[in-house]
């Protein structure tokens, strides 16, 4: 199985590192969830993976090539990225279709004919269940609708690697479940690799192939059928945390929990 992401002894944050000694591998078609408390470095890790910031030590390989400034643009052609939902409201009028089209590699290229992205945009809007919103003003959408538009923008180029920072934010329970099932389908049928940061540990563990427990470093990386030791949860969240199994397929849960 081909390796999509390989992280080698990554360190970031100066004398008091936000991330320290991160080593991780993601294969093609693998769906990984990353969980951890606020300030654990989850968003920072995604920003490092897309080259928005540079590590102090160690390196990242994407698709078998070391991520550097000179090849970042080339490698990121195959990466879709959803940052955290912004708190600022958009001010300029823009159609939903145009927001999604911004995710295409050649968007804004004057030599690309108008309408070249129409099929891709329509397909991904349908996939996200918001095709009817294509010509709506993005500013007038609800928070949940905007989040689905942003996810569609990350998906529109059909990336080999999808990085999602709290994609379930602003979505109701039904929309969250539909999203997680869609992501699972993209891994199984398209061979897409996904790294998803999310605070909902129970929801993440029911759909992903593995869960990485992050708080400055990787404390544990559990695959399907594995239990995460109690001391790992206490290291990450404190002594007061009790993690109970909610169904038989839950990754990280104690199988004999009651």
Image: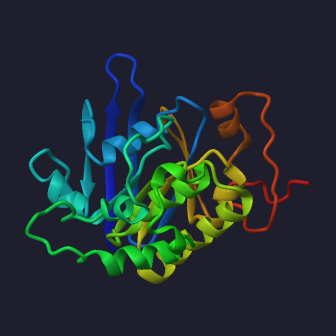
Viewer-proximal residue among 80 and 101: 101
Q: Quadrant of the N terminus?
A: bottom left
Q: How is the model colour-coded?
A: rainbow
**In the image shown, does 12 or 157 lie closer to the viewer?**
157
Residue at 40% x, 18% y is 16
Picture coordinates of residue 164, whole percent (x, y): 47, 54
Residue at the image point whose x is 48% and y is 38% from the top: 89
Q: Quadrant of the C terminus?
A: bottom right
Vertical relation: 91 (above or below) 180: above
Residue 81 appears in the rendering: yes
Residue 13 position (above or below residue 231) = above
Q: Is residue 197 left or right of residue 3?
A: right
Q: Nearer the viewer, residue 68 or 186?
A: 186
Image quadrant assignment for residue 15: top left
> Residue 240: x, y in percent?
80, 29
Name the outermost residue toward the top. 15
Taking the image as shown, residue 253 lies to the left or right of residue 93, namely right
Look at 58% across and 64% down and name the residue there. Answer: 208
Question: Is residue 64 visible in the rendered structure shown here?
Answer: no
Percent position of residue 253, x then y? 74, 54
Residue depicted at 50% across the width and 77% down the height: 126
Report the number of discs. Answer: 0
**Picture quadrant of residue 2:** bottom left
Q: Viewed as shown, does residue 42 lie left or right of 143?
A: left
Task: Tell me residue 100's x, y (percent).
Answer: 38, 63
Q: Is residue 174 left or right of residue 27?
A: right
């Amino acid at each position: 199985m081909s390796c999509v992401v390989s992280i080698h002894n990554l360190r970031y944050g100066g004398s008091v590192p936000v991330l320290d000694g991160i080593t991780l591998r993601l294969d093609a078609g693998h769906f990984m969830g990353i969980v951890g408390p606020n300030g654990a470095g989850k968003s920072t890790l995604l920003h490092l993976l897309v080259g928005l910031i540079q590590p102090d030590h160690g390196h990242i390989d994407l698709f078998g090539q070391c991520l550097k400034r000179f090849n970042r643009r080339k490698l990121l052609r195959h990466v879709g990225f959803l940052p955290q939902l912004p708190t600022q409201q958009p001010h300029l009028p823009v159609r939903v279709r145009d927001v999604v089209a911004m995710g295409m590699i050649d968007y804004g290229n004057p030599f690309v004919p108008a309408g070249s992205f129409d099929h891709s945009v329509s397909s991904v809007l349908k996939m996200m269940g918001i095709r009817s919103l294509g010509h709506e003003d993005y500013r007038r959408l609800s928070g949940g609708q905007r989040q689905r538009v942003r996810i569609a923008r990350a998906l529109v180029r059909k990336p080999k690697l999808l990085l999602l920072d709290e994609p379930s934010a602003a979505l109701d329970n039904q929309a969250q479940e539909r999203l997680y099932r869609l992501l699972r389908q993209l891994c199984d049928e398209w061979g897409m690799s996904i790294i998803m940061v999310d605070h909902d540990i129970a929801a993440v563990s029911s759909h992903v192939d593995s869960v990485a427990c992050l708080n400055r470093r990787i404390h544990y990386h559990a695959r399907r059928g594995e239990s995460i030791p109690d001391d790992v949860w206490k290291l990450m969240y404190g002594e007061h945390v009790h993690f109970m199994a909610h169904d038989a397929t839950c990754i990280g849960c104690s199988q004999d929990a009651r």
